[in-house]
Image (cartoon, rainbow, N blue to C red):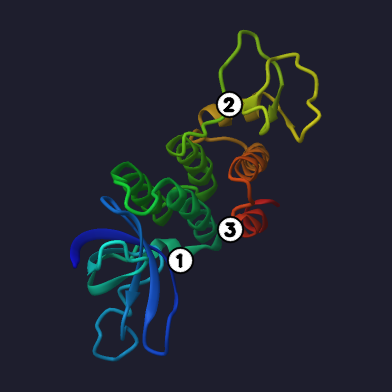
Amino acid sequence: MSRFSSSAVVLRKWPFSESSLALRVLTPAQGTVSLLAKGVHKPKSGSLGVLDTWALVDLQFGGPPGAEMLTLYKAGLIDRLPGLASSTEKLAAAGLLAEIAELAAPPGAPSEEVFAWFEGILRELAGDADPLTVLLGGILEGLALLGLSPILEKEDAEEARWFSPAAGGLLHSGASRPEERAKKAGQAELAILRNPRDSADLADQVAVLSMLGDFLGYHLERIPRAWPLVQKRFHP
């Protein structure tokens, strides 16, 4: 039997039985971990209010080597990050970026960089930062963690350029429209792609979000589960 003690972020939770929960958590040393929280709904468990989605927690868990789901022994709250619940935009952004974090931190893989990145993203979203600006920067940072950074090299005297997921990002200036799905990025969109956390016009930010959504869908080979809610909350 192995036993671990670790800080973690609760990514997802769902009912397992009348009194128990199943959890998916992100940890720095073990990547993403599936846990069974037995009896968590019982009044004396002391853990139900701790295990909120997106909460930063301190966990003790363990089980036999190779088990698909480990047992949660103890949970303590570090930070519930209540500011995340102040808008559906923040929750939508957190949901999409959590999917990227989960992909970037497979089970059993040391994931200190991914954990630090995602905790920082959640703290930004829980604060006063604009959620769309955080989301754009977070998508590009998450793609870098996955080894999927789009091509964004700057050219001399460049004008509008095609952004093609299939081609890996920006095409050269003057390139004809590709046959596959692509969007034209003007000067404002190019500036956001390269510096997503700088202040920018909302319409230009939304255009870049659409480009990055296409890029995610193509390179992840599926549309992220949170994408429909992101579209609804951020596309006027």
Q: Residue at x 39, y 78 (%)?
A: 21
Point out the image quarter for the N terminus: bottom left
Q: Residue at x 39, y 63 (%)?
A: 54
Residue 186 image-quadrant placement: top right
Rendering coords of residue 172 (x, y %): 68, 16
Q: Residue 228 shows which numbered tag?
A: none
Marked residue nearer the N-terminal end (1 or 3): 1
Rendering coords of residue 112 (x, y %): 28, 45
Give left or right: position of 159 versus 114: right
Q: Amino acid at mark 3?
A: Ala
Q: Residue at x 64, y 45 (%)?
A: 217
Name the residue beneath numbered marker 2.
Answer: 191
Marked residue nearer the N-terminal end (2 or 3): 2
* Secondary structure under the numbered disc 1 in the rendered image: helix
Marked residue nearer the N-terminal end (2 or 1): 1
Q: Amino acid at mark 2?
A: Ala
Q: Residue at x 66, y 58 (%)?
A: 228
Q: Residues within 10 Å of mark 1 (few under 14, many from 20)?
A: few
Is 197 located above or below residue 7 in the figure? above
Q: CA distance from mark 1 to mark 3?
A: 16 Å
* Secondary structure under the numbered disc 2 in the rendered image: helix
Name the residue beneath numbered marker 1.
Answer: 85
Q: CA distance from mark 2 to mark 1?
A: 30 Å
Rendering coords of residue 196 (x, y %): 52, 34
Name the residue beneath numbered marker 3.
Answer: 226
Q: Amino acid at mark 1?
A: Ala
